[in-house]
Image: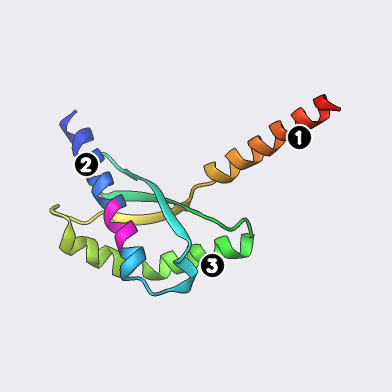
Amino acid sequence: MANAQRAGRLAQEIQKDVSDLLLKRVNDPRVQDVTVTSVDVSGDLQIANIYYSILSDLASDRKKAQAGLEAASGLIRRELGSRLTVYKIPEIHFILDNSIQYGDHIESLIRDLHRKEGK
């Protein structure tokens, strides 16, 4: 139980710090529209999966954002090392969070249904 709480606290801290770093320290235009949506830290605190979303629907922009995040991961991990109070900084993985696009898609389907019923 205590380990799960610790992982949760660490995930919150990583989310806050990575968001701050993307805004203030990473000067890569590929990541300027990236928003960190959540972070999952493994039970042993060795791996942090950082979920992000991007405003663009273009696959090319998503690929650029992923490449930008991967290029910045060394800097981000080093910065986390100075900010976090853990023995070992977790390995970080950036994963595109499609839930926002999925939600938008469902919403548009529902709107289309309502339009068809209204005719």
Q: In terms of secondary structure, where does tag 1 sit?
A: helix
Q: In terms of secondary structure, where does tag 3 sit?
A: helix
Q: Label for residue 9?
A: 2
Q: Which residues are magenta?
A: 16-20
Give the label, 1 or 3, closer to the camera.
Answer: 1
Q: Residue 17 lies in magenta, yes or no?
A: yes
Q: Mark 2, residues whose alpha carbon is within 10 Å: few (<14), some, or many (≥20)? A: few
Q: CA distance from mark 1 to mark 3?
A: 32 Å
Q: Residue at x 46, y 59 (%)?
A: 34
Q: Mark 3, residues whose alpha carbon is within 10 Å: few (<14), some, or many (≥20)? A: some
Residue 28 position within the rendered picture, expressed as x and y whole percent measured from the top left? 43, 73
- The answer to which of 32 and 94 lies nearer the viewer is 32
Q: Residue at x 28, y 52 (%)?
A: 16
Left or right, residue 53 beside residue 11? right
Q: Residue 19 lies in magenta, yes or no?
A: yes
Q: How many marks?
A: 3
Q: Residue at x 38, y 51 (%)?
A: 50
- The answer to which of 14 and 74 lies nearer the viewer is 14
Kind of residue indicated by mark 3: Lys
Residue 49 position within the rendered picture, expressed as x and y whole percent measured from the top left? 37, 49
Q: Label for residue 64?
A: 3
